[in-house]
Amino acid sequence: MKRKIIATEKAPVAVGAYSQGMKIGKFVFTSGQLPINPKTGEMPATIEEQTAQSLKNVSAILEDAGSSLDQAIKLTVFLQDINDFAAMNEVYASFFTGEAPCRSAVEVAAIPKGAKVEIEAIALISE
């Protein structure tokens, strides 16, 4: 299977040696998305705002690949503090209509740039 790198200006540029996303067959995989506004380069302060921005960034990559959050199969949420789970989950749930995709949420020691959350996804491509 051929793979295609996904790169969109609607999500933050990669801050390391990785791609924003990769399309392989009927699937798209995103790298973990920090809550950075791609237009301003700024990161919001609260876990709620950061969750929303990370999901907007994931969504932009999925859409560039011909998919969407509605086509997501699995998301992984990395939290700097597991005590932020309830607040993250409330915002997260607002991004999905109907059946939610599979998800893991784990606490990690640190997230780049001091972020409170980072989110990655695997989704089907609508073709």
Image: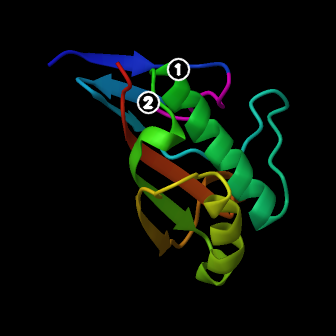
Quadrant including the C terminus? top left
Figure check: 37 above or below 87: above
Figure check: 48 above or below 112: below
Numbered disc 2: secondary structure: strand
Residue denoted by label 1: 64
Q: Residues within 10 Å of mark 1 (few under 14, many from 20)?
A: some
Residue denoted by label 2: 21
Please name the residue shown 45% across and 21% down the image: 65
Magenta residues (range): 10-18
Would residue 18 appear left or right of 63 to someone viewing this image?
A: left
Numbered disc 1: secondary structure: helix
Q: Residues within 10 Å of mark 2 (few under 14, many from 20)?
A: many
Name the front one of labels 2 and 1.
1
Q: Position of residue 14 (x, y in %)?
A: 56, 31
Would residue 59 appear left or right of 27 to someone viewing this image?
A: right
Quadrant including the N terminus? top left
Please name the residue shown 66% across and 31% down the image: 12
Q: Position of residue 36 (x, y in %)?
A: 73, 42
Would residue 65 appear left or right of 55 to someone viewing this image?
A: left
| Secondary structure mainly formed by the magenta segment | loop
Mark found first going from the N terminus, 2 or 1: 2
- Place residue 71 in its image quadrant: top left
Figure check: 69 above or below 114: above
The amino acid sitting under disc 1 is Asp
Would residue 27 appear left or right of 31 to someone viewing this image?
A: left
The amino acid sitting under disc 2 is Gly
Q: Which mark is residue 109?
A: none
Q: Position of residue 25 (x, y in %)?
A: 23, 23
Q: What's the CA distance linking mark 2 and mark 1?
A: 9 Å
Looking at the picture, tell me which residue is in the foreground, 4 or 66. 66
Residue found farthest to the bottom? 83
